[in-house]
Amino acid sequence: MQRALISGVLTGLMGGMLGSFTILRQLSFFSDALGHSALLGISLGLLLGISPTGVLLPFSVVFALLVTYLLEKTQLWTDALLNVIYSSSLAIAVITLSFVGQYKGGLNNLLFGDILAVRQADLVFSIVLLVICTVFIGLTLRTQMLISLHEPLAIARGISVSAHRTAFIVLLSLVVGISIKAIGVLLISAFVVIPSCAARLLSSTFTQYVVLSATIGAVSAVLGMLLSAWFNLPSGPSIVVTQLTIFLGTIAFPRRRLRAS
């Protein structure tokens, strides 16, 4: 339970931090597509006799780089392209699973989350990843802010938007990949999007928005796990329901106009 609480705080901070930029860049469907497409990585791992959790992170990074490449080369709408990749990956995953046969290694936990299954190695990786995300956002906050709010102006100022976008998406893919064990493939999108949407309704400055989004992500993870422990409920759905409750509560507050700060 102690590992679960620490993991919830770490993944909540990372999900909220990167999620704040994700929804402004209209990439909210990316985390959903990645989460569902991760089922393909899990299926390939099962077929090859490799631990599903060991496949998730490399698969997530490869998926992120593939999406970035296709977005730049095809010039298609982001949601349309992600829909193509998401549905195709899901179809291939189902076909792959048909060759696996009976699997009793906890596939259900990967689909819906089991934060109590978090290991010491997962915590170490989460801590390292949180440090990397914090340093990256801290050093490039102005740049990330400009890309999120006005990409043409960022290009006009000579910012390498493509490089920053690729770095951000790779980090997001790693966060989604490490969070799948706790939240599950089917719920990971809410973990990234809902805290950011709640923070967006409460924030008036960009810095406040990013900090509040990360805070809501961490707090909702802890409250959700406590709810799960008290009432013997699944951990992933409990966290998402807690996030939803916080989001619905923020609707009562007047919406503020987000400005750079």
Image (cartoon, grey):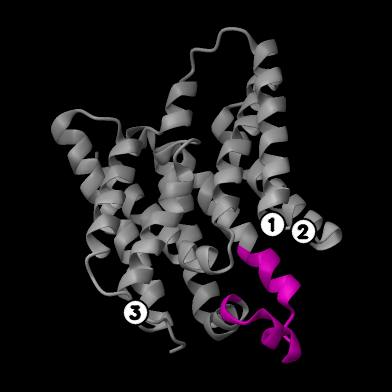
Q: Name the residue under label 1.
A: 78
Dots 2, 1 in contact, CB < 8 A: yes
| Predominant SS along the magenta part | helix
Find residue 190 and report its horizontal and vertical position in percent: 43, 48
In magenta, the rendered stretch is 148-168
Q: In which quarter of the image is residue 88?
A: top right
SS class of the residue under badge 3?
Answer: loop
103 vs 15, left or right, is right
Please tell me whether mark 2 or mark 3 is closer to you in this view.
Answer: 3
Q: Which of the labelled discs sits on residue 71, or is there none?
A: 2
SS class of the residue under badge 1?
Answer: helix
Please tell me whether mark 2 or mark 1 is closer to you in this view.
Answer: 1
Find residue 222 and report its horizontal and vertical position in percent: 24, 50
Q: What residue type is labelled 3?
A: Arg
Q: Residue at x 31, y 57 (%)?
A: 218
Q: Which residue is drawn at 72% across and 58% down?
A: 77
Q: In this view, does 170 lie above or below 222?
A: below
Nearest to the observer: residue 182 or residue 194: 194
